[in-house]
Amino acid sequence: MSVSPLPMTSTALQDELKRIEENTRTLLRVSTSRAKVGQTPKQVIWTFNKAKLYRYIPVVPTEQRHKVPLFLVFALMNKPYILDLRPGNSFIEYMVKQGYDVYLLDWGAPGLEDKELKFDDYVLDYLPRAIRKVKAVSGSDEFTMLGWCIGAILATIYAALRPDDGLKNLLLLTAPLDFTDKKAGGFVRWVNDQAFNPDKLVAAFGNVPGEMIDYGAKALKPVENYIGSYLTLWDNLDNPRIVESWHAMNTWVTDLIPMAGATYLQLIKELYREHRLIQGTMIIRGERVDLSRIRANLLNVIALADHISPTCQSESIMTKVSSQDQFLLKVKGGHIGMMAGSGALKYTWPHIDSWLAARSE
Amino acid sequence: MSDQSETINPLDPLDTMNTMRDASLKAWKSMRDTSLESWSKMMIDTVNSEDYSQITGQWLDTYLTLSQPFRRIIDTMMTQVLTGLNMPMRSDVTSLAERLTNIETRLDDQDAKLDDILSAIKAVSVSKPVAGTSAKAKGAR
């Protein structure tokens, strides 16, 4: 927030008071209201339990469009509109303009009746059904799947279990897959501590509350998240571009959803503690998840300043898959900033587009 | 800012005060950012330590243990109250939702089958005119 010269006249004093009033109003508005998010035109083409599948209205004529549809799978414990945050800062809007037929799977918020949902259900019930709809609507037997964070875990498991289902390209963004380094990041340390009992937590709440997951993510960088973020807003209250960007991001950050209890237990026990996914011992409904069965073209995008999924958790998959065409892209930024920050439009999105365009015909 | 600095009169006490205030604010801001940065590093080190993991794990365990009897009492009371009022309980709503999900699963299976039938019909209708064309061609011969 800029500082005006000391008021010398009554008019200057009035102006100064007016500015303070406006800034206070802005501060109140952005900290107490929800920004308009997810504005790219779309239609719901499928629903299943709490999940919804959106198709974004194409803006490029059919003949100029990429033939292979792009299917987006976000994490389970946050809303997926981070991929379509606001006009001008939306990955989905960008990809639609680049001529992709874009589909987004919104998992929805699990209720108590969903507490028994596991990775098995998401991967073998929800994903195949949504993918069938993507294929039916797009008219293409092949598709690209992009998974981000926990969504990348789901996409990886699916790609390993159903390699012949038409998956042409697999895009993984900040994928937490390998937890063998017990000192990489706060999460790994916390959940591996003997005092932490995930069974007790799930028994108490059924589903793990969104607030608890949010605390875990924020506590990894407490000063930045609890103080720094608000100071940035305070310093830039007279910059509408930064204020609106902060407002949209704050809307997303505070829009919390719980995580199904059984999925949480699987994540902590089988993945974080027992490394079953990366070691090829994870069993999904009786089928072993063998990463070497993944043959789809692979783009693995890693954020260099990711404190939630440190780079070592995402890199090792490159040596485990059988994909002939694979590329590891390292970009500046954090777990979310890499795709939704100011640099995403200049760097991350164009890189994803240029890699994918060549493989979507 | 540059326009203002150009018109600053060093002999004017208000202008001098403005300049001094700007300078002190700038210094305070830089000091604030520096201290926040070092505080942030310290906090990141703290939350990444074994001690922090142990303390938070133990705290959570204690909270869950202590709150368990209260949660059980509240559950029992709620069940009694809702039964007395002839209202559905949480378990009733949950089982109803599960049944709805089962119905939805069946509907989605039917939808998939319908899609298959439609695509089969389309395939047949595409192949039919071809057969008609070849019959016409035979007739022409």
Image (tube, coloured by chain):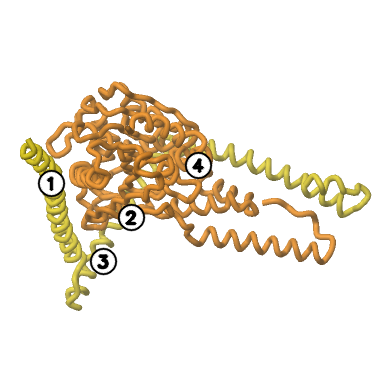
Chain colours: A orange, B yellow
Give how far across and how far down residue A266 sits, in percent: 24, 41
Residue at mark 1 = B125
Q: Earlier in the sequence, mark 4 or mark 2?
A: 2
Q: Are marks 4 and 3 on the same chain?
A: no
Q: Nearer the viewer, mark 4 or mark 2?
A: 2
The kind of residue tagged 3 is Ile
Query: Residue at 20% across / 31% down in the picture?
Result: A163
Q: Assign a secondary structure to mark 3.
A: helix
- Whole-angstrom CA distance, mark 4 to mark 3, is 45 Å
Q: Are marks 1 and 3 on the same chain?
A: yes
Q: Nearer the viewer, mark 1 or mark 4?
A: 1
The chain that hosts pointer 4 is A
Q: Which mark is residue A341?
A: 4
- Whole-angstrom CA distance, mark 4 to mark 2, is 26 Å
Q: Are marks 1 and 4 on the same chain?
A: no
Q: Are marks 2 and 1 in contact (CB under 8 Å)?
A: no
Q: Nearer the viewer, mark 2 or mark 1?
A: 1
The chain that hosts pointer 3 is B
Query: Residue at 12% across / 36% down in the picture?
Result: A286
- Whole-angstrom CA distance, mark 2 to mark 1, is 29 Å
- Whole-angstrom CA distance, mark 3 to mark 2, is 42 Å
The chain that hosts pointer 2 is A
Residue at mark 2 = A43
Around disc 2, counting alpha carbons within 10 Å, would you say few (fewer than 14), some (14 to 19), or many (20 or more)?
few
Residue at mark 3 = B74
A237 or A187, which lies in front?
A237
The kind of residue tagged 4 is Gly
B26 or A14, which lies in front?
A14
Q: Assign a secondary structure to mark 4.
A: loop
Q: Assign a secondary structure to mark 2.
A: strand
